[in-house]
Amino acid sequence: MFFSRKVITEDDLVDLYGKVALVTGGNTGIGYATIELFLARKGAKVYMASRNKEKAQKAIEEIEAELRKSDGEGESSKGSIHWLKLDLSDPRSVKEIGTEFLAKEERLDILVNNASHAAYGPFKLNKDGLLDIMVVNHISHFVLTETLLPLLKRTAALKDSDVRIVNVSSAAHAGVKPESFIGKESLNKQYGESVTGYINTYGNSKLANLLHIKNLQNRLNAESAGITCLALHPGTVMTEGSGDLLNSIPFIGWILKTCIGPLVFVSWKQGAMTSAFAAAGKEVAAERKRYEGVYLVPMAKIAEPSSYAKDERLQRELYETTVEVLEDIGVVF
């Protein structure tokens, strides 16, 4: 990239008419903006995958109203949005929903693993003895991706296809230095009951997003699948989770949120720009090899993740351990 981008607009994206996209956690925040401002406006049929039907339907109605407003009078030229019930706290349910989606749709061009458990603890072990934040941020997205891979591969085999898998990670991944990802306890590692500890535990799950996408790209390349996998840091975005985290710091948190927050945090729209570029950027389509397995930072720039994210041993260990813990709870691919 020979210049520094300041924004991503619709003009930077490919047309998505006739294409199908799935975005997790799209009823608020970055996911909402990714759907409303970019993917639907470019003509895609978008599935908003989230747990709460009422919140999802309200978000869809709001997005549809905005799309109609931008079209003016006459028939809408934009895409469509559909709710897909998805509970990322339960990998078994995710496998079931993914399997149902395979029977529902004939293609899937874009998968954006966007939803995230906030960097705000305390974190807990679920009924399967797995850390809740790692389940939501990594394990269930792993399940969704692996379940949908047959459909993604079939779509990639079609003429003029441009299939992409995007993991929304975080710069917080660089704050952790795991020795290994061998065994269940490596997924359950916590870094203490403090704000810094919570952020590092969150960062560990976001490192998993990067390790997953790089391992996935290598596996797909070995099959000549023709799918582009990308991970990204969206920027420091003020979401409900980041607000809760700041609120947890007595007094100073209020100052940070109220006085410094507007100078540091970016809007949902700005946060969604790098996601939209990863999912549908023209430049990615034109230079697929260059973008395979990369890590993007605002504004849609290729960057170097931590050395741990690039460690092929850790990538392999995480893949094998994730498969093992899923097999233990009856989720098999």
Image (cartoon, rainbow, N blue to C red):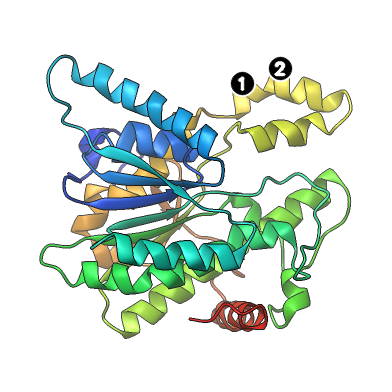
The amino acid marked with disc number 2 is: Cys
- Residue at 27% over, 77% down: 225
Relative image position of residue 236 (x, y in whole percent)? 58, 37
> Could you say which disc has been placed on residue 262 in the image?
1
The amino acid marked with disc number 1 is: Pro
Whole-angstrom CA distance, mark 1 to mark 2, is 7 Å
Relative image position of residue 17 (x, y in whole percent)? 16, 45
Disc 1 residue crowd, few under 14, some 14–19, many 20+, Cα 10 Å: few
Disc 2, SS: helix
Residue 117 as seen in the image, left or right of residue 209: right
Relative image position of residue 304 (x, y in whole percent)? 50, 60
Disc 1, disc 2: CB below 8 Å? yes
- Residue at 56% over, 77% down: 315
Residue 150 as seen in the image, left or right of residue 201: left
Task: Report the front residue among 157 and 215.
Answer: 157
Relative image position of residue 75 (x, y in whole percent)? 13, 24
Residue 156 in view = yes
